[in-house]
Amino acid sequence: MSSIFFNLNTYFIDEKVNSFKFENCYKVFNDKGNEVGSVNQKLSSGEKAIRLLLNKTMLPFQLEIKDASGNLQAYISRGWTFFMSTILIDDAKGNTIGTIKQKFKLLKPTFKIYNKSEELVAVITGDMKAWNFQINNATDKQIGTITKKWNGALKEIFTTADKYKVDLNEDYTDESNRIVILSSAITIDMVWKQSR
């Protein structure tokens, strides 16, 4: 059974400005504008120092997804890398439940999402210039989107470029894959920034 956090179909991701930009920090809201969680990058003092010296695309990273009460929901991490990386998705208990594998396509980032059995469950492809992504399932049917174009009341709240919306279709009910797909989609901005 997926957690309440991952039962939502719409997420608004709002980047919080960090003065030194060592760690990425985002707040997560639902479609009513209520804060439902956060995504934070975790760095040790040593890792912060290394980031001043080395290209960040090579460096490991760790992202924590928490609900509004501060409870860990999922953990995303990557080790040292020198080209296209594989990113691990762990549940709150530390069990690896999926992976994200990047595919190199000029100006069209592609992320393939696999479950713990290494079966393809989704592909996220995007146009970084327009900041639009499409989430398709393993049979290439669209099941969601990631975009910066919103309608409604929240459009007035979130107006800057560092904010985006994740939508997963209501009829996508495969609970075993929701956490993996949504974890990937919610952190897509950070994953892409760390990989460029």
Image (cartoon, grey):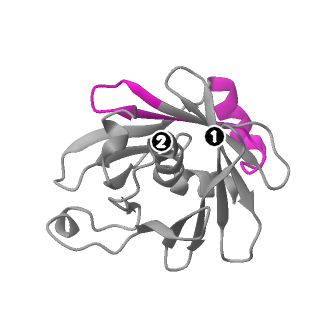
**Residue 67 image point, x, y percent:** 33, 32
Answer few, some or many: residues within 10 Å of disc 1's Cα (few below 14, many 20 plus, some between 14 and 19). Answer: many
Which comes sooner in the sequence, label 2 or label 1? 1
**Residue 68 image point, x, y percent:** 28, 32
What span is in magenta? 45-73
Residue lying farthest right? 82
**Residue 143 image point, x, y percent:** 45, 65
Instruction: Report whether residue 62 is seen.
Output: no
Residue type, numbered disc 1:
Gly
**On screen, residue 91 above or below 169:** above
In-front residue for pair 119/65: 119
CA gap, disc 2 to disc 1?
A: 9 Å
In-front residue for pair 49/117: 117
Q: Residue at x 70, y 40 (%)?
A: 51
In-front residue for pair 58/118: 118
Residue type, numbered disc 2:
Ile
Q: Residue at x 69, y 60 (%)?
A: 196
147 relative to 28 in the view: left or right: right
Residue 112, quarter of picture: bottom right
Q: Residue at x 17, y 68 (%)?
A: 156
151 relative to 106 in the view: left or right: left
| Label 2 close to label 1 by CB (< 8 Å) | yes
Q: Mark 2 falls on what kind of element?
A: helix
Report which residue position mark 1 lands on: 98
**Residue 98 image point, x, y percent:** 63, 40
Q: Which mark is residue 179?
A: 2
Q: Is residue 52 magenta?
A: yes
